[in-house]
Amino acid sequence: MKLFITRIVLSLMHFRQWLVAQIIFGFLNFLKLFPADGGIRFADWLTRLIGPRMQRHKLMVTNLRNAFPEKSDAEIEEIALASWGNMGRLAAEYVFLDRLFDFDPERVEPGRVEVSGIPIFLELRDNPRPFIVFTGHTGNFELLPVAGAAFGLTVTVLFRPPNNPYVAQKVFDFRSARMGHLVPSHAGSSFALARQLEAGAGVGVLVDQKFRKGLKTTFFGREVKTNPLLPKLVRQFNCEVYPARCIRLPGNRYRLEIEPKLELPRDERGNLDLPATAQMLNDKVEGWVRENPEQWLWYHDRWNIKKALFKK
């Protein structure tokens, strides 16, 4: 009897996941009816309308107040609303990604995408060696590996699949066709990335995700745990580390930036300082977010406060 009930519960759970996935796919297919600019603007408008009515809005506003205690309630709400719009744009941009990346170094007139740091892209491509590019959830971060592929720079990207398996498979297929080799984040992902570095290739990672166990660091002055994966890979392979980000510009345009390699902190014996390196990554992402706070995903539970917040 227990087995029968378990099967029913699992079947209902799978059906719910399938139904949610169909709603998401239906919405994205609906966006295809629009021109790219119209679809992106519509998604921005819709998520600004729906987002503040969702429970996560409370978490978003709390995160913003903790990060920017100097800002007024009106300023916090304005950033939160724009952050919901940013999320809507991300969803729509999946649909139009093939049309969005139009960078051409030979073109005189600026296109939708501009790239800063082209010499770094080319130098990494022309002088192969192990390296790591890191970014945060800023702007449309999905465009960065697309840019790398456009320059002939193949980077193995670590990504966290959505919890919904139907959505996860669709996202994986979509990304694989446009972003090169992908490694889903799971227990064995560190070995997959290590093999790429060992082979003299590059990897890309997001460093601002919630992590339950890790190095003690701070982000916006508040304690967080940071994934030690990147510092450990650097320690093992002595590879270079490059920051990269996407910035949204007016008119549905984007600037992709790759910055010069970081000089990573070391202890008195010359060994890589893992906690200090993790803190350096956080500080770099925090600087980006402070420049454009509305372009970061504040609904993430980066500071692990959601359970306590919603108990109130």
Image (cartoon, helix red, strand yellow):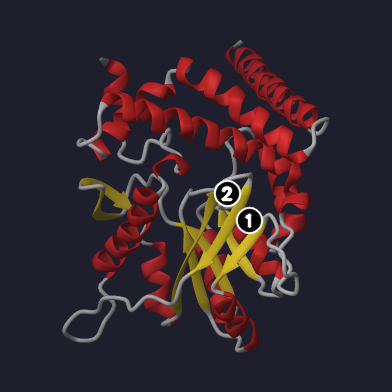
Task: Answer yes or no: is residue 156 visible.
Answer: yes
* Label 1 – label 2 distance at C-alpha: 6 Å
Q: Residue at x 83, y 30 (%)?
A: 33
Q: Between residue 263 and residue 223, name the one nearer to us.
A: 263
Q: Residue at x 63, y 56 (%)?
A: 143
Q: Amino acid at mark 2?
A: Asn
Q: Position of residue 64 (x, y in %)?
A: 31, 34
Give the residue at the far left of this rendering.
268
Q: Secondary structure at mark 2?
A: loop
Given contact means CB atoms under 8 Å apart, are the residues at marks 1 and 2 in contact? yes
Q: Is residue 263 left or right of residue 196?
A: left
Q: Residues within 10 Å of mark 1 (few under 14, many from 20)?
A: many
Location of residue 186 with respect to 95 vertically, above or below: below
Q: Residue at x 57, y 14 (%)?
A: 2
Q: Residues within 10 Å of mark 2 (few under 14, many from 20)?
A: many
Location of the C terminus (image quadrant): top left
Q: Relative to 81, is 111 above or below?
A: below
Q: Quadrant of the N terminus?
A: top right
Quadrant housing residue 256: bottom right
**Label 1: which residue?**
143
Dividing the picture into quadrants, the one containing residue 276 is bottom left
Residue 272 occupies which quadrant of the picture? bottom left
In the image, 185 versus 287, the foreground residue is 287
Q: How many marks?
A: 2
**Which residue is depicted at the point 46% across and 71% down?**
259
- Say whether residue 212 is left or right of residue 118: left
Give the SS element for disc 1: helix
Kind of residue indicated by mark 1: Leu
For disc 2, the marked residue is 140
- Indicate the position of residue 137 as horizontal and vertical percent values: 48, 48
